[in-house]
Image: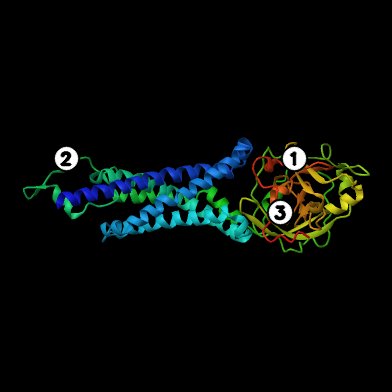
């Protein structure tokens, strides 16, 4: 009976070791790939590989369900072994909450088109928060639990049970420490101090503080405007609806994504052109461009990666008016947009380009659009995801053939409509 029980416990221990090992590797991959996906430098370097990495991140996130479900099947047995060990129970619950929270928020981000922008924005915040708080804890938990499960006598976090203590007593006399085998690497007190110190460093570190500030920042673009590297004169004079912004100021914070280094412009190196299959080609310098009659609109801005900035007050030229000024020829079928970075392009059909809220924007919340957010001029497509809203826009070309944009070439959907887009 004792041998059978020992074999049962040994098999159970092996299962827990396997769960923790797989969990550690999966979380490590998800952490590294997640950092690569959000980093601006890596977005530029990875190029098309970023799309493959994104799908690998999603796939591994779904695979993470396997060890979680596997553990839940063993949870009843494990919970019995933790009887009276409240700190260990709390640790298990904490890790499960982290894993389930990551998986649930990740699924919402994966299915962002079905979930909608507000749900995706909330899920992204939760996903980021759990990462900042839980990633070091869960990796440490997985690694140390594997060592503990393999060598119970060396475990440092979990106190020995009465039966284990009895095993170390010979003839009614406890063996000396030297004969009890290697001592714990960390004492309980040392571990608590290290955990608290690491937790404070992580959760109160400058990067985390910046992330918290951006997550709750109102208005969203103030810090970018202060560091605007563009030097174009004169500044456009905002219309009355822009200053103060009729939208009340943007709610949320822009995340700066770019596939190249962020360019900066001045009067000597900036111009705006509309050409191709048009009756009249136009090229404006900055002084001429800011004299064109602008309009104001309030709209939300949604990134395909899950974040949103709400109630933006944009001031600029409706794209349809620019097209009418140039005169679109009958052969034209596509409007192609060029970024001033010399790399990025995208396109709209003529029907999409004539949507009344598609705008060539010059001001955001009554201020010049900073170069970090795509200024001095960027496209705004409120009913589509933001990879259609070309930054540093400096040329519009009417063409006869179709055009596949930068990210569409790399796996993004050519159909960038938001869920429930009005398309009017």
The answer to whether residue 231 is seen in the rendering is no
Q: Position of residue 314 (x, y in %)?
A: 77, 56
Where does label 3 land, which residue?
384
Q: Quarter of the image containing the C terminus?
A: bottom right
Where does label 1 land, which residue?
264
Identify the element where label 1 is drawn: loop
* Residue at screen point 45% across, 49% down: 64
Identify the element where label 2 is drawn: helix
The reply, left or right, for residue 217 in relation to residue 390 is left
Q: Position of residue 14 (x, y in %)?
A: 29, 46
The answer to whether residue 299 is seen in the rendering is yes
Identify the element where label 3 is drawn: loop
Is 280 or 266 nearer to us in this picture?
Answer: 280
Is 12 or 224 nearer to us in this picture?
Answer: 12
Q: Position of residue 38 (x, y in %)?
A: 58, 45
- Mark 1 surroundings: few (<14), some (14-19) or many (≥20) residues within 10 A: many
């Amino acid at each position: 009976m004792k041998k059978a029980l020992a074999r049962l416990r040994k098999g159970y221990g092996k299962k827990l070791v396997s769960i923790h090992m797989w969990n550690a590797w999966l979380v490590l991959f998800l952490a590294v790939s997640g950092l690569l996906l959000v980093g601006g430098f890596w977005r530029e370097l990875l190029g098309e590989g970023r799309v493959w990495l994104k799908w690998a991140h999603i796939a591994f996130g779904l695979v993470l369900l396997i060890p979680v479900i596997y553990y839940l099947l063993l949870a009843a047995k494990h919970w019995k072994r933790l009887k009276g060990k409240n700190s260990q129970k709390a640790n298990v619950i904490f890790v499960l909450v982290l894993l389930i929270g990551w998986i649930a928020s990740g699924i919402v981000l994966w299915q962002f088109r079905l979930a909608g922008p507000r749900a995706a924005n909330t899920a992204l915040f939760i996903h980021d928060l759990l990462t900042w708080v839980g990633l070091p804890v869960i990796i440490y938990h997985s690694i140390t639990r594997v060592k503990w499960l393999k060598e119970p006598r060396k475990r440092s976090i979990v106190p020995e049970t009465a039966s284990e203590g009895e095993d170390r007593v010979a003839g009614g006399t406890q063996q000396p420490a030297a004969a009890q085998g290697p001592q714990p690497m960390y004492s309980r007190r040392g571990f608590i101090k290290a955990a608290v110190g690491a937790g404070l460093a992580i959760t109160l570190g400058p990067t985390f503080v910046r992330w918290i500030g951006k997550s709750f920042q109102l208005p969203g673009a103030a810090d970018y405007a202060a560091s605007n590297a563009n030097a174009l004169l004169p500044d456009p004079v905002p219309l009355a609806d822009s200053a103060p912004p009729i939208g009340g100021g943007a709610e949320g914070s822009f995340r700066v994504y770019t596939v190249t280094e962020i360019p900066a412009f001045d009067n000597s190196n900036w111009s705006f052109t509309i050409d191709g299959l048009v009756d009249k080609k136009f090229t404006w310098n900055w002084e001429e461009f800011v004299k064109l009659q602008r309009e104001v609109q309030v709209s939300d801005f949604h990134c395909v990666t899950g974040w949103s900035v709400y109630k933006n007050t944009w001031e600029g030229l409706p794209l349809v008016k620019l097209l009418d000024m140039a005169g679109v020829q009958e052969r034209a079928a596509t409007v192609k947009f060029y970024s001033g970075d010399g790399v990025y392009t995208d396109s709209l059909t003529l029907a999409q380009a004539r949507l009344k809220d598609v705008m060539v924007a010059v001001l955001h919340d009554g201020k010049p659009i900073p170069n970090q957010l795509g200024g001095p001029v960027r496209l705004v497509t409120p009913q589509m995801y933001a990879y259609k809203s070309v930054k540093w826009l400096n040329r519009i070309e009417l063409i006869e053939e179709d055009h596949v944009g930068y990210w569409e070439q790399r796996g993004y959907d050519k159909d960038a409509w938001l869920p429930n887009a009005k398309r009017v």
